[in-house]
Image (cartoon, rainbow, N blue to C red):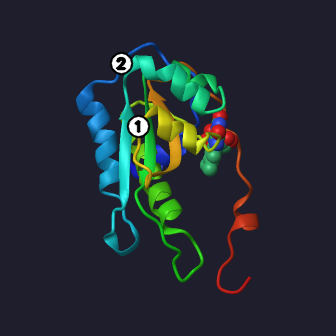
Amino acid sequence: MTVKEAIEKRKSIRKYLDKDIPADILNEVLEAGRLAPSAKNMQNWVFIAVTDKELRPFMKEACGGQNCIGEAPASIVVCATEDSVMNCGQHRSTVDCSIALSFMMLRATELGLGTVWLGHFFADKVKEVLNLPENFIPIAVTPIGYPAEEPASRGRKPMEEVTHFNKY
Ligand SMILES: Cc1cc2nc3c(=O)[nH]c(=O)nc-3n(C[C@H](O)[C@H](O)[C@H](O)COP(=O)(O)O)c2cc1C
């Protein structure tokens, strides 16, 4: 699968088969995050792969009761370990971790796995459930597993609306 094909194929998957992800496959996904670029190559991130079935209901609660996180065989929590604001005004923790998770989501697609970015979660609860150190900042969560649905495309704004060449 080409990168273009993975980008086009990826859709948010919220229903998963009751099938574990082999450890080497899950590692491949995490590896895509490890290789992602970060500001000054600081790599101030930690990826927590949650595979313990007993943690699922707690993760579901920490994610506002979203069923997908309780159903998936695993989830990935992307945490920043420190933060600072770049000259552009953006938090490098958010930017770096978002790139890393995007890379992981595309690799997951290539490997036949489904994901859905979850922004609706309570960071303090996630930290408590996973016993994360105080300085960790959970930036994003995704359930991950073999898809049990084939959702239709959500559609996107037209190219002319979202892109401009040279001056706006
Ligand atoms: C920053 C962000 C936060 C999101 N949070 C949630 C969420 O908490 N729960 C959920 O079901 N989907 C969530 N989504 C998924 C979006 O709803 C989804 O990506 C969007 O509708 C486009 O659909 P697609 O991913 O299938 O292309 C989130 C996506 C992003 C990028």
Residue under the point 40% across and 47% down = 133
| Residue drawn at point x = 57 percent, y = 44 percent | 123
Q: Residue at x 34, y 24 (%)?
A: 21
Residue 3: percent from left, percent from top: 41, 51
Residue 109 occupies quadrant: top left
Viewer-nearest residue: 50 or 132 = 132
Q: Quadrant of the N terminus?
A: top left
**What's the residue type where badge 1 is placed?**
Asn
Q: Residue 146, image x and y in percent?
A: 44, 23
x%, y% of residue 51? 37, 25
Residue 109 higher or lower than 147, as above or below: below
- The secondary structure type at the circle numbered 1 is loop
Would residue 46 be found to the left or right of residue 98 on screen?
left
- In the rendered image, the quadrant that contains the C terminus is bottom right
Callout 2 secondary element: loop
Q: Residue furthest bottom?
A: 167
Q: Which residue matches tag 2?
A: 20
Label for residue 42?
A: none
Precedes in sequence: disc 2 or disc 1: 2
Query: Which residue is nearer to you in this view: 19 or 149?
Result: 19
